[in-house]
Image (cartoon, helix red, strand yellow):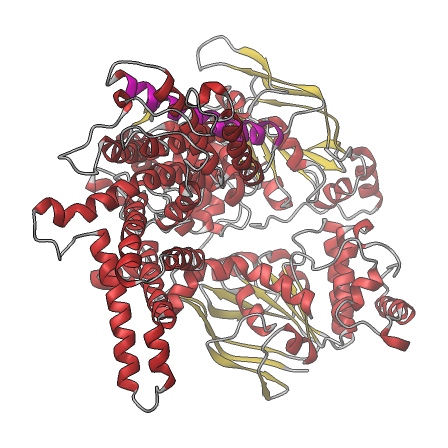
């Protein structure tokens, strides 16, 4: 899925320089270090990800300009006064992107206080928390070779359990929060366990099962909300009572950053440790890279799938906590998961399924969400453009050769690929002729 | 038709697969292209067949330069190719396969099967092939399928026929038949480019031999050149073609397989009542043409397939302690590995290694849950790295560093990683499937010597190999399989054609008596592959 050249901390190869010397028996003369470094950077999938974002912004700019009425007008007399057209386009695009930036990172127009200036950034962080949790969840699945599309359902189940504990159990502050977190994890884990065990025992395709379970989760929550015990006493509306304040996340410095963000970062570190430093992670990675070799080496591939889906589901369940525990007195309703479960697929892909990448991708998407609102209100650019940006990013990540050819980057994989596909190609040619 | 390649160069990134290769194939000549795996033979032929575009150089036919943008152009110019893995559609008949892509049509564009059949009959009659045009390809033996491929090439009026490792899938008898066909084709004026790494075949049939090493032509040779000289040209140094092997001193029986039967998911009988024993310090080689149940036998022994019935008794124990007996049938792979069984899978890329993992990680793939590589579920990265540094030196794995991924290694070095992992602990039984498939001569020597060391240390060894020369070089006894049955177990000095008959299903006694009547009891020539 990715080349070895990543920013993610890799296990140190060998602490003993002597042993490395012995192993270094490269027959060819080494090219200069600069060349190697540049080549590595160019072939790195991280660069591809970054460039995908750049290309998406360019395409977004074209669409923003095209959708603007002043630009459309100026286009009518493009050949008479081209400067009008380009001026209008520049104004529109720069206005939209600068308000996107100000809504996501820093508010330069406010001079009241430092807190006001950085308020957009704190909002970005708050939006990113569920994306990071769910992105980490899906990333684990991807690395195990499981395409878990069910984060949405797992978030809903996490929210259901977390919410129920939050409004119906009345526990002391702190304890209540911990129990709510456990509930969110357990709800998601249980929902992830179903496709995991089905795949392990019957070979059921996890993509189909998780997609179906998303719908099941929505209707299950909808049904629960028709029950008396899930409704506000005296009202028969599909909305739950308010969460106890004892279950809320503590906030840092009166901002929208709360304990949830810290937990998301901790989760990222734990996921890194799990994947890179434990036998379970080793097994998960081996199964994901080559299940045949994993099986031949005596690993229980089926059990690995179950573990992965449980951990993945649990992490996705935790994504629900930022919806319920961040602001005081939240209520459980059928839209509680918003579209986080689906956005998280993009986040995990953009982050190359690695924890650090997922955190960065989560922050980027949180920023797009936070800035999108200001962009819409300040410049009238439709917020749908954010969706376009996200979609273009996914598209380009799914087709790295496209990005490479746009930027004329070298393709280090080509050699290996062309060798291995030579046979396949000859097959196809044979069939075609 | 005279075919000439001039200064053909093909690069893949930094790798020069073909470096200014010159090759002339005269009409009616069998031109052997000899080289180790990875020497660039197949790349060159793919350039010639239009599958790759050459970076430099020319292809000339009868003195005129041609360019091929695809196999279609090559075929139109009279070049035919029989790939190592056949390009046939199993559920089609012979006639349908032969005309595929150039179907003779009748009225309203309908395929004229009558003309297709006539075409097949005509060509097979010309060369004395006994092929029924209406037989399903699936029902044909491998040798006959190959003949269908040859008919297909000839039906497009190929003047130059490229045969890519054509003998890899054949029994010795089928190989001899193929040689006859090649001579006939030559007599009828077709030139043949014969790609191989088997010295014996080259000597037998070739008119001219071109040896390729590391993408360069290192020289030509006549068929009279000795095998040792050919081998050293191929490898670039003196090679020892025979394995130093002392007589075995078998100890107590380690593994007893009795009545082992395996029925596949589709209800086919894959293994039929297999019985044999292997003793400590003994190598039992399982020979047979590919696809006769050897792979399934190995997979049943290691637990990748659950036997339908039968038992696999293993007597094992740490050195010095009293041996315990365990029935491995139905046990999980990890339980069998823990019972001190080592396994070198047939397809190292698929079953032996995780390509994206580092060498260090691959070296502990089956041992990662045990000390010293992990403690209470947490990996000991230091121990894993130390183990890698140790094994890389011990087994001479050529890599930039132990943290390089195994995908960057050559086939020989990849196999060394697998062998290093499997032989790094005390073994009662070693199961090695095709342990040297696709390797260069140097790596083959190395791996053979490691396997013999293992035998010397008292391990019972089962080798599954389709390379007869490997079987005879290593085995103490040879078990031959045919269609899921054990045809018989023969002594290690059994003559090549007797083994060949057994591989076609003839029992040992019968094969021996046939051998006596046919008086040619010459001992098997030793060849490196």
Seen as rendered, the residue at the extreme bottom is A80
- Quadrant of residue B508 within the rendered picture: top right
- Quadrant of residue A199 within the rendered picture: top right
Position of B35 relative to A332 (above/below): below
Position of A414 relative to A146 (above/below): below
Inspect the magenta stretch and tell me whether residue A199 lies in it: yes
- Quadrant of residue B331 within the rendered picture: top right
- The one nearer the camera, B258 or A343, is A343
- The one nearer the camera, A295 or A172, is A172
Residue A108 lies, in percent from the top left, at: 13, 57
Position of B255 relative to A342 (above/below): above
**Start-end of magenta stretch:** A176-202
Whether residue A137 sits left or right of residue B207 in the image: it is left
Residue B466 lies, in percent from the top left, at: 64, 44
- The one nearer the camera, B156 or A289, is A289
Position of A298 relative to A399 (above/below): above
Count of marks placed on residues: 0
- The one nearer the camera, B33 or B379, is B379
Question: Principal SS element in the magenta part?
Answer: helix
**In this rendering, does residue A142 appear at all?**
yes
Residue B103 lies, in percent from the top left, at: 81, 71
């Amino acid at each position: 899925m990715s080349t070895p050249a990543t920013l993610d901390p890799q296990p140190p190869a060998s602490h003993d320089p002597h042993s490395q010397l012995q192993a270094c028996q490269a027959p060819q003369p080494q090219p200069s270090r600069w060349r190697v470094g540049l080549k590595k950077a160019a072939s790195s999938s991280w660069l591809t990800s970054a460039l995908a974002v750049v290309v998406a912004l360019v395409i977004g700019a074209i669409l923003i300009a095209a959708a603007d009425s002043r630009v459309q007008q100026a286009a009518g007399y493009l050949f008479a006064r081209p400067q009008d057209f380009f001026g209008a386009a520049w104004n529109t695009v720069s206005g939209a992107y600068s308000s996107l930036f100000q809504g996501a990172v820093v508010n330069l127009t406010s001079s009241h206080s430092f807190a006001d200036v950085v308020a957009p950034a704190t909002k970005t962080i708050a939006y990113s928390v569920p994306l990071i949790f769910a992105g980490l969840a899906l990333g684990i699945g991807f690395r195990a070779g499981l395409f878990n599309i069910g984060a949405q359902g797992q978030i809903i189940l996490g929210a259901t359990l977390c919410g129920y504990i939050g409004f119906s159990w009345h526990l002391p502050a702190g304890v209540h929060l911990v129990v709510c977190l456990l509930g969110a994890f357990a709800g998601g884990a249980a929902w992830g366990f179903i496709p995991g065990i089905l795949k392990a025992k019957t070979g059921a395709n996890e993509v189909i099962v998780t997609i179906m379970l998303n719908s099941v989760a929505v209707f299950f929550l909808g049904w629960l909300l028709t029950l008396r015990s899930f409704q506000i006493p005296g009202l028969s509306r599909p909305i739950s009572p308010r969460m106890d304040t004892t279950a809320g996340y503590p906030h840092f410095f009166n901002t929208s950053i709360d304990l949830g963000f810290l937990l998301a970062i901790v989760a990222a570190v734990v996921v890194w440790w799990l994947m890179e430093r434990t036998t379970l992670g080793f097994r998960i990675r081996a199964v994901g890279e080559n299940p045949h070799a994993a099986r031949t080496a005596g690993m229980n591939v089926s059990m690995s799938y179950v573990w992965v889906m449980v951990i993945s589901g649990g992490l996705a369940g935790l994504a629900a906590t930022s919806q319920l525990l961040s602001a005081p007195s939240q209520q459980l309703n059928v839209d509680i998961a918003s579209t986080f479960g689906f956005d998280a697929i993009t986040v995990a892909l953009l982050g190359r399924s690695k924890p650090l990448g997922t955190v960065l991708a989560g922050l980027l998407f949180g920023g797009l969400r936070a800035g999108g609102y200001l962009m819409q209100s300040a410049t009238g650019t439709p917020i749908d453009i954010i969706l376009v940006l996200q979609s273009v990013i996914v598209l380009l990540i799914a087709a790295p050769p496209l990005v490479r050819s746009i930027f004329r980057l070298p393709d280090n994989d080509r050699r290996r690929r062309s060798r291995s596909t030579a046979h396949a190609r000859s097959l196809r040619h044979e069939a075609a002729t | 038709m005279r075919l000439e390649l001039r200064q053909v160069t093909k690069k893949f990134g930094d790798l020069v697969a073909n470096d200014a290769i010159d090759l002339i194939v005269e009409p009616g000549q069998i031109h052997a292209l000899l080289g180790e795996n990875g020497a660039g033979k197949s790349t060159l032929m793919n350039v010639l067949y239009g599958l790759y575009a050459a970076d430099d150089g020319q292809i000339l036919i009868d003195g005129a330069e041609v360019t091929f943008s695809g196999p279609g152009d090559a075929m139109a110019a009279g070049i035919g190719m029989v790939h190592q893995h056949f390009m046939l559609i199993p559920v089609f008949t012979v006639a349908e396969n032969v005309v595929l892509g150039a179907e003779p049509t009748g009225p309203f564009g309908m395929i004229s099967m009558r003309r297709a059949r006539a075409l097949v009959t005509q060509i097979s009659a010309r060369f004395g092939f006994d092929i029924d045009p209406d037989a399903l390809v699936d029902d044909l033996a491998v040798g006959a399928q190959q003949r269908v491929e040859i008919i297909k090439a000839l039906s497009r009026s190929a003047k130059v026929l490229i045969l890519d490792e054509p003998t890899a899938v054949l029994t010795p008898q089928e190989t001899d038949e193929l040689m006859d066909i090649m001579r006939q084709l030559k007599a009828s004026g077709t030139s043949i480019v014969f790609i191989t790494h088997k010295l014996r075949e080259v000597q037998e049939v070739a008119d001219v031999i071109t040896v390729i090493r590391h993408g360069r032509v290192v020289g030509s040779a006549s068929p009279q050149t000795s095998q040792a000289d050919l081998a050293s040209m191929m490898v670039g140094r003196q090679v020892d073609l025979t394995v130093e092997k002392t007589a075995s001193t078998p100890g107590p029986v380690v593994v007893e397989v009795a009545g082992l039967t395996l029925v596949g998911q589709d209800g086919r009988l894959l293994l039929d009542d297999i019985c044999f024993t292997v003793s400590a310090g003994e190598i039992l080689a399982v020979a047979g043409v590919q696809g006769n149940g050897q792979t399934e036998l190995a997979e049943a022994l290691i637990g990748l397939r659950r036997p339908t019935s039968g038992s696999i008794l293993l007597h094992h124990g740490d050195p010095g302690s009293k041996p315990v007996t365990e029935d491995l049938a139905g046990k999980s792979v990890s339980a069998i590995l823990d019972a001190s069984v080592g396994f070198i899978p047939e397809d190292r890329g698929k079953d032996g290694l995780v390509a994206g993992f580092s060498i260090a990680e691959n070296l502990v793939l089956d041992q990662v849950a045990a000390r010293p590589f992990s403690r209470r579920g947490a990996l000991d990265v230091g121990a894993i790295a130390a183990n890698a540094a140790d094994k890389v030196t011990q087994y001479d794995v050529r890599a930039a560093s132990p943290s390089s991924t195994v995908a960057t290694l050559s086939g020989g070095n990849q196999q060394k990683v697998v062998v290093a992992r499997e032989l790094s602990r005390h073994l009662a039984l070693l199961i090695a499937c095709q342990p040297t498939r696709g390797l260069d001569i140097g790596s083959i020597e190395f791996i053979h010597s490691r396997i013999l060391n293992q035998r010397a240390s008292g391990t019972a060894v089962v080798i599954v190999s389709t390379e007869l020369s490997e079987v005879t070089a290593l085995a103490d006894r040879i078990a031959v399989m045919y269609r899921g049955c054990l045809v018989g177990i023969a002594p290690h000095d059994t003559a090549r054609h007797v083994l060949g008959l057994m591989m076609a299903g003839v029992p040992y006694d019968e094969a021996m008596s046939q051998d006596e009547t046919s008086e040619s009891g010459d001992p098997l020539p030793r060849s490196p592959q």
